[in-house]
Amino acid sequence: MNLSLNLVAIRTLVRKEVVRVMRIWVQTIVPPAITMTLYFIIFGNLIGRRIGSMDGFDYMQYIAPGLIMMSIITTSYGNVVSSFFGAKFGRHVEEMLVSPMSNSAIIIGHVAGGVLRGLAVGALVTVVALLFTDLRIEHPLITVTMVLLSSAVFALAGFINAVFAKKFDDISIVPTFVLTPLTYLGGVFYSISLLPEFWQTVSKANPILYMVNAFRYGILGTSDISVGHAYAIVLLFVVVLFSTCLYLMHRGVGIRE
């Protein structure tokens, strides 16, 4: 399949994903914004008054980038896992497999849809954050690229979850028992410098820590870890997860079985 046909296939998948999200925007876009509003009120406003400042910033300012990134990560993951599993469940994934569409186009189309929904939710949560605190982007390029890469990482992870899922319950296991704990322990609400040395080392095994801190650096100019290391780790995850998705599609795991 030549490049032009692949681009048409990707564009079609992305359009399908966008239409699906916008058709039920009350369920896909609004709930994360409401959830993050509650986080800002409870953690930022009520608890933040007692905490004071962190790394030289008002606590509300400090947690805002983390909450924005958390909403982007969870939304990107959830969009792809539900969309591709829905295609499997409805058996219209078979239409994509027998079409001239390449496996790479199928993956990229679904991942792009997840990234776009993550960006939409992230933009809405940012607007909510601006109602509570003042945010000025210190490093726009780092901010944008880290959002795109982090969103892509979890969209790819959602695709893998959907490939292995056999029933609807399977698509909620990873978000509940893996993604949520990693997010809460990823430096969203605190600086890892507050932790004992052992737990700082343990925290550095959490990839979300690097995404949150690099994004925070892009907005506030402060980070607990090296931004260069963050980019290296996130790019490595993108390559490994995309390669895994491609391998699973070529083998027909969870699809042709």
Image: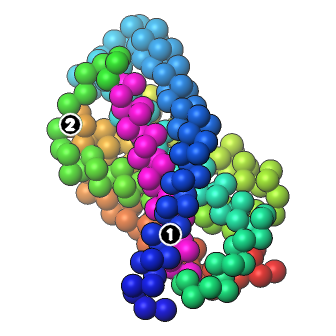
- Residue that numbered label 1 is attached to: 12
Vertical placement of residue 72 versus 189, above or below: below
Q: Residue furthest bottom?
A: 1
Question: Are there few (<14), some (14-19), or many (20+) residues within 10 Å of tag 1?
Answer: few
In the image, 156 versus 34, the foreground residue is 34
Question: What residue type is disc 2 on?
Answer: Ile
Residue 69 or 190: which is nearer the viewer?
69
Dominant secondary structure of the magenta stretch? helix
State the mark number for residue 158: none
Q: Residue at x 39, y 85 (%)?
A: 4
Marks 1/2 in contact by CB < 8 Å: the verdict is no
x 59%, y 34%: residue? 26
Query: In the image, is residue 112 part of the stretch drawn in magenta?
Result: yes
Q: Which residue is mark 2?
A: 137
| Chain-order first, disc 1 or disc 2 | 1
Q: Give, as a single range, the part of the protein colored magenta.
A: 103-129
Q: Report whether 9 appears left or right of 7.
A: right
Q: Quadrant of the C terminus?
A: bottom right
In this rendering, the answer to whether 196 lies above or below 100 is above
Is 236 situated above or below 36?
A: below
Secondary structure state at the residue bearing disc 2:
loop
